[in-house]
């Protein structure tokens, strides 16, 4: 027991949690419990997870910002290879922090986990040459229920690290690149999301 340290309401946003597991290491390597239901419940985190996902991406890939409308998902995310900047935006219409964003650096090295409850848009930018991203979900994926938010909406003003470029009125990757010259890559689907003023709210 007691294998995790939890920072609740990260960034002053209710429900966001940064979780740091205890790392047991020696000359051979290390061991961590990546999930322990009892420890989570002792920390007041009683959500139930029903699906695990994993993705691989190369440097400069930006995924998001995504959510499900009728079947919202809470997500417990972590990185097992490389480094990403993980971001969420509060879309809960009755929240005092509606429209506010928060980001955290997740890496295989720091082994931090980030819990994002239902009611948020979520995405990440890959900062390392490659990254493998894992997450647990509180509801199943419903392909017909997808929603999204423009990753570069100036009304939100996410400060993506190591990324340069100017907003052109579109969430496309045109005009953006990493500071080392790596081009930003986003999916065609993610070029079509609208800004906060025109998006779904929970």
Image (cartoon, rainbow, N blue to C red):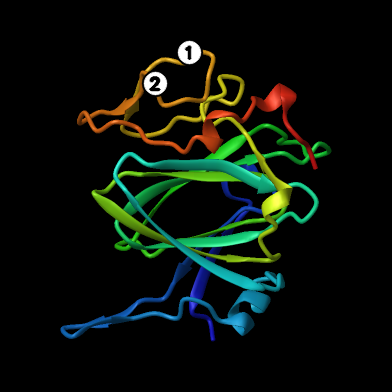
Q: In this view, does 190 lie to the left or right of 142?
A: left
Res. 119 visible in picture: no
How much space separates mark 1 and mark 2, taking CA atoms? 8 Å
Residue beneath the point at 66% across and 72% down: 49
| Residue 141 drawn at (x, y percent) | 66, 60
Image quarter in which the N terminus is found: bottom right
Residue in the image at 31% along x and 27% along y = 177
Marks 1 and 2 close (CB-CB < 8 Å): yes
Any mark on residue 56, and which? none
Judging depth in this view, the residue of 81 and 19 nearest the camera is 81
Residue that mark 2 sits on = 174
Q: How many labels does the image show?
A: 2
Residue 98, image x, y percentages: 72, 34
Q: In which quarter of the image is the C terminus?
A: top right
Instruction: In the rendered structure, find residue 168 and report the number of the disc placed on it.
Output: 1
Q: Can residue 108 be seen in this view?
A: yes
Residue reaching furthest to the left: 27
């Amino acid at each position: 027991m007691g294998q995790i340290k939890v920072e609740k309401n990260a960034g002053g946003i209710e429900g966001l949690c940064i979780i740091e597991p205890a790392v047991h290491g020696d000359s051979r390597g290390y061991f961590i419990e990546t999930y322990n239901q009892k420890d989570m419940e002792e920390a007041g985190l009683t959500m139930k997870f029903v699906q695990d996902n994993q993705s691989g991406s190369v440097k400069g890939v930006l995924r998001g910002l995504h959510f499900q409308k009728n079947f919202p998902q809470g997500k417990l995310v972590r990185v097992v290879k490389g480094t990403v900047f993980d971001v969420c935006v509060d879309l809960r219409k009755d929240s005092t922090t509606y429209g506010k964003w928060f980001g955290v650096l997740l890496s295989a090295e720091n082994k931090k986990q980030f819990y994002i409850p239902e009611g948020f848009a979520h995405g990440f930018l890959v900062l390392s040459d490659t990254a493998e991203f894992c997450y647990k979900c509180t509801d199943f994926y419903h392909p017909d229920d997808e929603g999204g938010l423009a990753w570069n909406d100036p009304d939100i003003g996410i400060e993506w690290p190591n990324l340069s470029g100017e907003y052109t009125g579109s969430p496309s990757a045109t005009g953006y690149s990493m500071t080392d010259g790596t081009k930003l890559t986003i999916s065609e689907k993610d070029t079509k999301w609208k800004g906060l003023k025109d998006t779904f709210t929970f």
